[in-house]
Amino acid sequence: MPRIKYIESDVTLLARIMRAEALGEGEVGMQLVGNVVVNRVIADCSTFKKMNTISKVVYQPGQFAGVDTPLFKAYPTKKEQRLAKECLDYFTKWPATRSLYFKNPGKNKPCPSQFWGPFVGKYKQHCFYRAKDGLKCNI
């Protein structure tokens, strides 16, 4: 059973944002970003209550800088679509398993201990963060 209900255009959109945000992080890095996007659809805490589709999450104002890049605008490859579909169907992996946020602070820069929530872990250049303490998101 998939992690969320989705349609084919969700696969394409998720693949595009995964590539735009994490192409340089390889397949796993892109899937960790996809994991966070799907987590936001699943989350039922106040911050993401109305973010119940991939499209709403991706286009939520101010959330993903990648939406304004040529990498996002281009159609995804079959491999990128496969990675996105895996995220929608079953993929979860630490440090993104329950993360709702990620940040790339820049090459060789440490992860801040807080970024909308407490630091969970790092994969290559991306830092991952869970919901703030006390916020029950049920991911």
Image: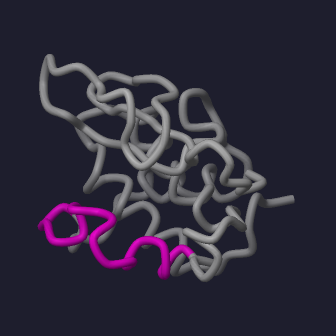
The residue that appears at 30% across and 63% down in the rendered structure is: 64
Q: In this view, does 124 lie to the left or right of 99?
A: left
For the point 53% across and 53% down, the residue is 82
Q: Where is residue 103 in the image (x, y as percent from the top left)?
A: 31, 42
Report the predominant secondary structure element of the magenta stretch. helix
Q: Residue 118 vs residue 23: left or right?
A: right
Name the image quarter holding the N terminus. Answer: bottom right
- Measured as percent of width and height from the top left, residue 28 is found at 46, 32
Tell me residue 86's x, y (percent): 63, 50
Provide residue 39's location: percent of width, then percent of height: 62, 55
Assess whether residue 62 is covered by the magenta stretch.
Answer: yes
State how the image is colored.
one colour
Residue at horizontal 29%, vertical 71%? 75
Is 91 on the left or on the right of 103, as rendered?
A: right
Q: In which quarter of the image is residue 26?
A: top left
Q: Give the range drawn in magenta.
A: 54-71
Name which residue lies at 37% across and 43% down.
115
Q: Is residue 97 above or below residue 41?
A: above
Q: Quadrant of residue 58?
A: bottom left
Q: Quadrant of residue 109?
A: top left
Relative height, residue 31 to residue 18 (above, below): above
Q: Nearer the viewer, residue 107 or 45?
A: 45
The front one of 26 and 66 is 66
- Note whether 53 is above or below 105 in the view shown: below
Residue 104 in the figure: left or right of residue 63: left
In this view, the residue farthest toward the right is: 1
